């Protein structure tokens, strides 16, 4: 199944209380140059309380930057297109100073076919970036096409230092080996899923109450009536869930959008049909109503992220919901507020159905294992060198460059701990430039180190008045990190092998889900939505849906047992 998260500026949380050092800005990756430049174990706290890596030198380490390193990289997503390496500030610095050049292999909006073709021809890229424990990752492992990291993780310091032993074990595959290098791993709440509101439009409409689904509906009608050139509700890429999955969580306390992503809903200790789920059905009725009344983007099923970005940056969206709307909204806020102090965006508390407790609504989720993973294929000439780079990338030096650019711009020098950057005046005086830098590096954030980035940012941001805090960070502290739920138990090993009976059924159900959610969105009435979902449910069970649900029930229960130490 598709992940609803993109390569986000998804920073993770340290959500402590006001005076405590809170976690910092959205996530990027780190670096800590190979053997010679990585910090000692005592200077960087473990992300999860696990023991730090040994300080004793390890022989035969590959040193990033000592010699040129070139490898190919493939992002296994229809939506993902890797930017040209060396054109943004971060990768340009890495290319010039660390002698690393990465060549993109693009999916061309057809990731499934692309990977199948490469596997069949045995011409795999050196690195593949994909969903953790996905069916495709499993198939690559079963086909003996991936390189295990067990030896490497003991030699290179950063991943072992910042990721807990428990998390490492959860990442291991069925054969007991570690093949997956995680992105945005954490032990603290993080994520940006939720609702962003156009500040100027909201104020011009009288700043009405915007708390319930009824409030949202009335507000969108008011937007449509007054602003003919503005999209009332922008759900981003509906084919990937995005805003529709966020809306789902508004209709039940403690409901998780991750359930919809898994295409199975936990009820009474087992996984059940998403098509028959009352909450999903009600949320689809609501979404279909917005769509047919033209309160939602009419090209929600066909638009690209670039088109969404253009609308957001130009202020042509009233309410924007997705797995990480702050990616574009932060940049848009900087641009719009610079031209007009009353313009820009704010993040509102999650919308809830009337009668529900707003503090039990979670539009997004996080996993302690992060989002997706990088794997190294056996096509790589020097897999250890690539792992050393990924380890550097997820360490403090790499993360500093990715998140805040090269030294001398938004930061200059390090604090006494040897890893925390000292932010310059430019950091606070040029929010638009910083947002642009982070937006540019967003799509090369493959190994984000959540805790390092957030704690680092917190040290600085907590000293600033609210009006001078980074836009992203402010709303992460105030809203998004407080409203993301831990979905680790639903995030590991939930997809069976592609060529197994369960895997074949899962793919068939996925195709049905895509087709029938689109049909439901186009429904002309609430009754038609239910009829469409009933038909989808019947078709899903006819192609083996129960096999998928049984597999996911077992995987979920096994995850819970493992997390409880059993």
Image (cartoon, grey):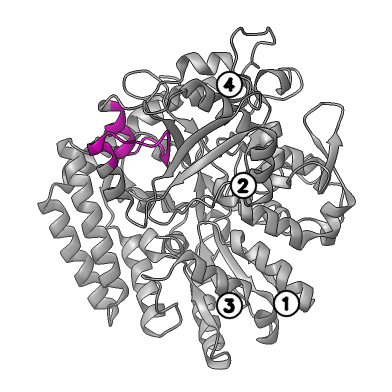
Rounded to the nearest angstrom, the CA distance separating label 1 from label 4 is 44 Å
Q: CA distance from mark 2 to mark 4?
A: 28 Å
Q: Does the magenta portion include 123? A: yes
Residue 323 percent across, percent down from the top left: 50, 57
| Location of mark 4 (residue) | 160
Front of the two marks 2 and 3: 2
> Compared to 143, does 534 lie above or below?
below
Which of the labelled discs sits on residue 86, or is there none?
A: 2
**Contact flag, marks 1 and 4 (Cβ < 8 Å):** no
Residue toward you, 311 or 20: 311
Query: Do the CB atoms of the residues marked 1 and 3 lie less than 8 Å apart?
Result: no
Tell me the crowding category of disc 1: few under 14, some 14 to 19, or many 20 or more residues within 10 angstroms, Cα based. Answer: many
Q: Which residues are magenta?
A: 118-141
Q: Is residue 196 something that shows in the picture? A: yes
Name which quarter of the figure residue 556 lies in. top left
Residue 73, image x, y percentages: 46, 40
Residue 496 visible, this angle: no
Disc on the earlier residue, 2 or 3: 2
**Measured Cα–Cα span from mark 1 to mark 3:** 12 Å
57, above or below 502, in the image = above
Q: Which residue does the image show at 58% across and 21% down from the upper left?
A: 160
Q: What element does badge 2 sit on?
A: loop
Q: Secondary structure at mark 1?
A: loop
Pick whichever of labels 3 and 4 is earlier in the sequence. 4
Closer-to-camera residue (123/503) = 123
Question: Disc number at residue 318?
Answer: 3
């Amino acid at each position: 199944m598709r992940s609803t998260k993109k390569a986000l500026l998804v920073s993770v949380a340290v959500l402590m209380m006001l005076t405590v050092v809170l976690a910092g800005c959205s996530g990027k990756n780190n670096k800590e140059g190979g053997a010679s430049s990585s910090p000692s174990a005592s200077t960087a706290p473990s992300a999860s309380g696990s023991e730090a890596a040994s300080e004793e030198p390890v022989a035969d380490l590959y040193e990033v930057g000592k010699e040129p390193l070139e490898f190919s990289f493939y992002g296994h997503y229809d939506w993902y297109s890797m930017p040209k390496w060396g054109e943004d500030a971060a990768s340009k610095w890495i290319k010039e100073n660390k002698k690393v050049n990465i060549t993109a292999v693009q999916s061309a909006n057809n990731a499934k076919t692309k990977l199948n073709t490469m596997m069949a021809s045995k011409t795999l890229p050196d690195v593949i970036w994909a969903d953790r424990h996905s069916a495709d990752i499993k198939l690559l492992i079963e086909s003996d096409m991936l390189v295990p990291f067990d030896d490497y993780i003991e030699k290179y310091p950063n991943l072992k230092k910042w990721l807990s032993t428990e998390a490492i074990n959860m990442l291991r595959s069925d054969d007991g080996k570690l093949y997956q290098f995680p992105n945005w791993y954490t032990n603290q709440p993080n994520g940006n899923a939720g609702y962003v509101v156009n500040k100027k439009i909201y104020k011009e409409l009288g700043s009405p109450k915007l708390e319930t689904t009824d409030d949202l509906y009335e507000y969108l009608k008011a937007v449509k009536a007054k602003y003919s050139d503005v999209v009332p509700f922008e759900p981003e890429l509906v084919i990937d869930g995005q805003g529709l999955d966020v809306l789902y969580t508004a209709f039940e306390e403690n409901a998780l959008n991750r359930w919809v992503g898994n295409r199975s809903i936990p009820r009474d200790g087992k996984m059940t049909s998403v098509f028959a789920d009352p909450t999903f059905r009600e949320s689809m009725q609501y979404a279909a109503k917005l769509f047919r009344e033209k309160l939602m983007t009419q090209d929600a099923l066909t638009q690209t992220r670039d088109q969404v970005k253009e609308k957001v940056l130009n202020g042509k969206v009233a309410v924007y919901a997705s797995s990480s709307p702050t990616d574009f909204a932060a940049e848009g806020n900087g641009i719009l507020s610079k031209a007009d102090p009353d313009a820009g965006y704010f993040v509102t508390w999650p919308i809830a159905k009337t009668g529900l407790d707003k503090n039990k609504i979670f539009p997004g989720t996080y996993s302690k294992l992060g989002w997706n993973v990088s794997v190294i294929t056996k096509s790589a000439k020097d897999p250890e060198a690539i792992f050393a780079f990924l380890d550097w990338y997820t360490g403090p030096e790499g993360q500093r460059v990715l998140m805040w650019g090269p030294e001398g711009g938004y930061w200059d020098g390090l604090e006494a701990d040897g890893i925390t950057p000292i932010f310059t005046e430019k950091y606070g005086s040029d929010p638009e430039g910083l947002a642009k830098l982070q937006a540019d590096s967003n799509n090369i954030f493959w190994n984000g180190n959540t805790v390092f980035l957030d704690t680092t940012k917190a040290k600085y941001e907590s000293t600033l008045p609210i009006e001078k805090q980074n836009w992203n960070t402010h709303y992460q502290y105030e809203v998004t990190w407080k409203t993301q739920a831990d979905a680790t138990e639903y995030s590991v090993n939930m997809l069976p092998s592609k060529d197994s009976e369960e895997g074949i059924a899962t793919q068939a159900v996925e195709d049905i889900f895509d087709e029938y959610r689109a049909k439901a969105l186009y429904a002309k009435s609430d009754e038609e939505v239910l009829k469409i979902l009933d038909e989808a449910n019947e078709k899903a069970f006819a192609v083996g849906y129960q096999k998928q649900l049984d597999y996911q029930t077992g995987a979920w229960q096994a995850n819970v047992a493992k997390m409880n130490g059993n």
